Amino acid sequence: MEKEITIYDIARELSISPTTVSRGLNNHPAVNKNTKQKIFDAAAQMGYRSNAFASRLRKQRTNTLGVIVPRLDSNFQSLVMAGMEKVANEAGYNLIISQSLETAQKEIANARTMFENRVDGLLVSLAYDTENIDHFEPFFSKGIPLLFYDRVPENKQCTSIVINNIQAAHTATTHLVEQGCQRIVHISGNLRINVYKDRLKGYKYALMDHNIAFRENYVIETNLSEQAGVEAANKILQMDPLPDGIFVANDTCAVSCIKTLKQAGISIPGDIAVVGFNNDPITRIIEPNLTSVDYPGGEMGEVAVRSLINYLDGVSDVSITNTITLRSELVVRESSLKKKLTAPPAKSGKAAGMV
Amino acid sequence: MEKEITIYDIARELSISPTTVSRGLNNHPAVNKNTKQKIFDAAAQMGYRSNAFASRLRKQRTNTLGVIVPRLDSNFQSLVMAGMEKVANEAGYNLIISQSLETAQKEIANARTMFENRVDGLLVSLAYDTENIDHFEPFFSKGIPLLFYDRVPENKQCTSIVINNIQAAHTATTHLVEQGCQRIVHISGNLRINVYKDRLKGYKYALMDHNIAFRENYVIETNLSEQAGVEAANKILQMDPLPDGIFVANDTCAVSCIKTLKQAGISIPGDIAVVGFNNDPITRIIEPNLTSVDYPGGEMGEVAVRSLINYLDGVSDVSITNTITLRSELVVRESSLKKKLTAPPAKSGKAAGMV
DNA sequence: CTTAAAATTGCAACCGATTGCAGAAACATT
DNA sequence: AATGTTTCTGCAATCGGTTGCAATTTTAAG
């Protein structure tokens, strides 16, 4: 437990003022080169470490960003976190990360903690049961930039980073139609969440555009878990006639659904073509490999933090850039290919054609 | 941009001293009940929020834990993070998370940041190329508890949380032997890392225990990536005679290895039995389902944070509890079953027998 | 050699909460 | 009524950097 070295100690040692030491350490232009060097040397030699709190207290800037995420243990979110941390770290920002575990209650508590920790900016992906975003009011009224990603609030003037879920779902569904599917089931997530609501919309629009009637009972709302995939598959197995296509709102669920259907003797894509969403690694492991919408998680995290920091640095104005939409694309693999590709056949299925 | 409310404002409003306000807000027993109530009411009404920095500066306790992790975008690590965040959050601690991206250089920089941020404790899983742990010296000398998990330093008196990799690998290898394998290849990770070094050891010991000669060229050192699995498989395909068992140090690599072998016409487990490590979700998707060592990531994260907090609270003494070893177990699935189980056959392979 | 301009340095007042110690007020005891 | 206890409150110093402004030193110009 050695004593902590402060700028005062360095000042005393060099017989100069703490002011100069502080400026020197921060590379302030108004400090003589030689003095600076002396300060750096003394600091290194004495084992000085800056006290971030004192600095933050005074500067009212924390160089810290907060993140509130539904869960950390999802493939998508961990990609996002990795991207966020990378950019934040490079820019000299710390990241305080917390999970809402899909409950509004925890989200509210976390928001409060973030606020008291004086984060310079906050990144949020909403929980399942978040009904409103009143708990972020303090951030708005204090002018702390708040950026939503992926799970964003609806009808609000919030800065957000998303993909075009409607379009992506439209493309996915259209792809199934083009493969000859006429009875397409959609396994959806919680429809209170914008992401899943939009995917449902895209699915509907695509049917409409191809003059296929929308059937209420073809939409199965689930929590998209592995278990849910099994249950959905069982529901589907009882449909008569059997559907010939399924568009699932995530890959985990799609994969367990496929497994269950295969066990029941259904051929994929022969009997039923399947398309998932997220392009998780498991898409390339299930047999047949799963067609899925590639969802750039890492990029989303990077872009989110970059935007926030740019705003904080006054480079750009997030409040004007209201929504950033990232590109997503359908990666076609065997699970949806009823017709052979006209192009030279994809080889190992690893990186099949795009649409 | 409203003005920030401080305890001084509340004090003025109520015509009492800031001291009493501070005590009141912290529920100090020496403050009159009525006064407390008045303070709470005023605080709520005026929109007061505590300034964590001022508090930390004074208290020298931050209620913040730092985490340095190789990468966030791995299934195992995201489980660990989720577990850590959960426990930390419940105990009122913040988590500052940073990635070393497997480089010692970043790990050193991150350690320094954590130190300057005055984390109350630090959790670390080492990077690939970390050669020594000198960069954590400031933590030792200042008595800041430091806890390593999974990727821990060797021959050091550091508190660490691990599984018994030697034993787990021994069990896995023994299982292959019991299935009749005699020519067992081991696909390993970077052998500078304790985890992989130990798994190799366990593999060797098991061979020894069954009087099977260890062959240098049966150990393939890789980075355990998907790509590495393909390359390792190709190496294996050129061996003559072909091995009849493979023990891979992680699942990702095992799965891509299996895929490649299958494409080459090898039957799994008929020709070659395979065992992986981690029990990732993909083990249940690949066909045949992959036998693997269940590795309790979430639990590891929870235990790690809980130990640290207990120590900080003076409940336990981590410096005495030098190593915590978590239980791991082999989950047997089809990929390694050359012989049928004698017990009633496992049904869907979802949760097959244990050894 | 003077004087003005430029380059450095330092004083002192913050930032906002916490806490040891002393003093005041309220209550209890002869 | 006097004294001893308890219960509450407040003073003032402290945590360790940061920064506006003034003071001092150096350099340049006349």
Image (tube, coloured by chain):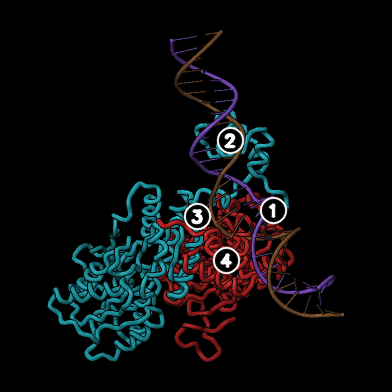
Chain colours: A cyan, B red, C brown, D purple
In front: label 1 or label 4: 4
Residue receiving disc 1:
B142
Under circle 2, the secondary element is helix
**Marks 1/4: CA distance?**
20 Å
Mark 3 or 2, nearer chain start: 2
Alpha carbon of mark 3 to alpha carbon of mark 2: how far?
27 Å
Q: Which residue is under mark 4?
A: B93
Name which quarter of the figure residue B128 lies in.
bottom right
Dot 3: within a 10 Å radius of its alpha carbon, few (fewer than 14), some, or many (20 or more) residues? many
Residue B68 visible to the viewer: no
Residue of label 2? A20
Q: Residues within 10 Å of mark 2 (few under 14, many from 20)?
A: some
Q: Secondary structure at mark 3?
A: strand
From the viewer's perspective, is residue A277 above or below residue B158?
Answer: below
Chain ID of residue with mark 3:
A
Amino acid found under the numbered disc labelled 1:
Lys
- Judged left or right of residue B33, residue A193 is left
